Image (cartoon, helix red, strand yellow):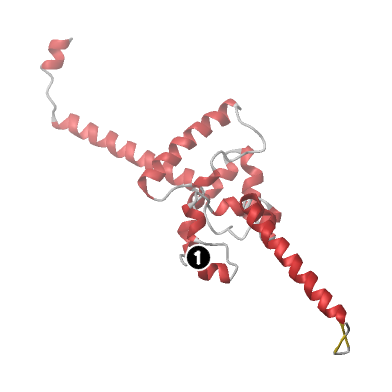
Amino acid sequence: MFSKLRNFQFTLKHFAMLGVFAIFGFTFMYVSVEMSSASSFCGTACHEMNPEYESWQHSAHKNVECAECHEKPGLAGTIESKAQGTMETIAHITGNYDTPIVMEHPEKIDCYSCHQDKIKTNTEVAYERKDPHTMKHFENGLNCITCHAGVVHNEQANNTLPTRDRCYTCHLDDMSKLTNKTNVQMSYAKTEAARTLNGVIVK
């Protein structure tokens, strides 16, 4: 057997066969990647994804493909996404998955590619404008989903902005000081208003 392998020589026919297999394999991979990257694949191939698919269709992001948010840009992101997709396919076939679907790594959601214009590098200017979209938050390990949790797949999150309760999760001490200061200022203003009657200071 081994002697036959040592004496084996590639002929033009063998190269042609390898070429056909290579073309077939590349075509199969390309079609598979394209089909599995379509949002309709997520919603129709896996019934457990129907709620997420329907909520996406009724959101402001309905013209943005699922892969644009859930897949990192570039070849490495595609490979990582398809590897994860393979594991999810196995879970789908075996029925070994949780319902409702829970995203294990929300920090991987890519909002920045489309919304990078929202990020303010000048923290002081953003603070004056009461704009929370500062680079400082990202440098401290936060991302868009930290505050905008549920966006796209949650109707309430789609229709309302995050409240200050979300800020309290990180800025409890600072917000408490601000609230106390504001209450003191309002109390003083109400006292001054009460002392004034028709423009006359009441002592």
Residue farthest to the front, as pictured: 203
Residue type, numbered disc 1: Thr
What's the residue at 15%, 16% (across, down)? 5
What's the residue at 50%, 62% (across, down)? 115
Query: Percent position (x, y) of residue 66?
Result: 53, 50
In depth, the one of 37 and 139 nearer the eye is: 139
Query: Percent position (x, y) of residue 143?
Result: 53, 52
Query: Percent position (x, y) of residue 142?
Result: 53, 51
Compared with 147, 10 (above or below) is above
What's the residue at 52%, 33% (across, down)? 89
Query: Percent position (x, y) of residue 133?
Result: 54, 62
Q: Which residue is mark 1?
A: 123
Quarter-of-image position of residue 97: top right
Compared with 126, 151 (above or below) is above
The answer to whether residue 163 of the structure is visible from this angle is no
Q: Is residue 196 left or right of residue 89?
A: right
Q: Is residue 195 left or right of residue 169?
A: right
All told, the count of numbered labels is 1
10 Å crowding of disc 1: few (<14), some (14-19), many (20+): some
Could you say whether the residue bearing mark 1 is in a helix, strand or loop? helix
In depth, the one of 12 and 111 nearer the eye is: 111
Q: Quadrant of the C terminus?
A: bottom right
Q: Quadrant of the N terminus?
A: top left
What's the residue at 28%, 36% (across, down)? 22
The answer to whether residue 156 of the structure is visible from this angle is yes
In depth, the one of 133 and 47 nearer the eye is: 133
